[in-house]
Image (cartoon, rainbow, N blue to C red):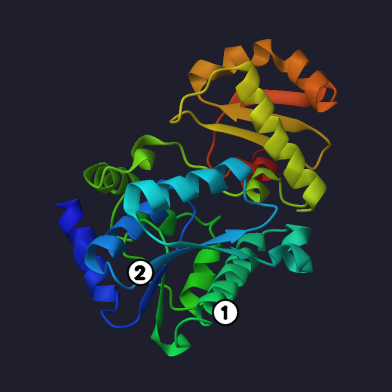
Amino acid sequence: NCVVRARNAVIASGSAVGLNVVAFSGGVDSSVVGALLKDCFPLNSVGVIGVSKSLPRKQLELARKVAEEDIGLDLLEIETVEGKKREYVDNVGESCYHCKVSLYECSIEAVGNIFPRDGIRLFNGTNLDDVGDKTRVGLKAASEFRVASPLETLTKSEVREVARWYGLRTASYAASPCLRSRLEFGVRAVEEHLALVESAEEKVRELVEFGKGDDLRFRMLGSGRYRVEVGESKVGLVLGVRSELGKRLGLESDKIDVGLFRSGGAARFRDAA
């Protein structure tokens, strides 16, 4: 079954004597890898989470809880520096790559202070569905840093099945990628823009009730417009509070569109327009 396949992949990629390090976000994919590492290599596995302006505060809080309470995995919080790179800030299609380079470099540097670098084995939560997604240019960085992807033969639904087997709270949670992913290509990934989309999503949740498994994205478009993307059952509800949302954000409500959620919508919106 998928649990056995995942365990075998981790055992084959991991090290019994080195240090196994998973790039941890608290999302279901990296949480599953963290649980697998803790299961297979309990004494020499840790998680590392990159902390920057692109990480939602609530996601960091969730990651801490999942690592400590669900897995029992030590979690190192490190400051990443992608926000200082022009190539990342310009956000023209390669930001994810530069973000992952920063994450892996900073992870190796941080862990290398407590363990010999030649004994460090990096892992990520890339699954089979991710492999075919052309918007995930961060996979190039993973290849360059020889990061192991033990879930790459499992679909997202299979990853969630493994998460349920390990009792992870995130098994049915909606995905929550970084805040930069809410920006249309060409909209600069600066602190002001990242803070706006984070605040906007919090305010949408204040106005409309969302479950842990409900998708929600507030996207900032290059045309000076914004777009709230949600599941079909939430579209009418969000439309009903659009005026109030605009007031709370200090934005003109007629510049806020509402539509169906699409994964990678900010990256694809320009092509669809």
In the rendered image, the vertical position of residue 262 relative to residue 121, given as above or below: above
Left or right, residue 9 beside residue 97? left
Snapshot quadrant of residue 47: bottom left
Position in image of residue 117 (x %, y %)? 47, 86
Residue type highlighted by circle 2: Ser
Please say whether residue 220 is visible from this viewpoint: no
Q: Residue at x 75, y 25 (%)?
A: 256
- Tell whether 79 sits left or right of 164: right
Task: Look at the numbered disc 2 and give the secondary structure of its residue.
Answer: strand
* Residue type at numbered disc 1: Glu
Q: Residue at x 32, y 59 (%)?
A: 151
Q: Locate the C terminus by quadrant.
A: top right
Q: Is residue 150 above or below residue 56?
A: below
* Count of marks, rendered view: 2
Mark drawn on residue 45: 2
Crowd around label 1: few <14 · some 14–19 · many ≥20 (10 Å): some
Residue 109 is marked as: 1
Disc 1 is placed on an element classified as helix
Q: Which mark is residue 184?
A: none
Left or right: residue 92 versus residue 69 is: right
| Location of residue 9 in the rendering, given as x and y in whole percent from the top left corner | 24, 67
The quarter of the displayed image where residue 234 is located:
top right
In front here: 61 or 34? 61
User: Is residue 159 depicted above or below 223 in this figure?
Assistant: below
Q: Position of residue 4 (x, y in %)?
A: 16, 58
* Whole-percent x, y for residue 90 in the image: 78, 60
Horizontal side of 173 relative to 203 (left or right) equals left
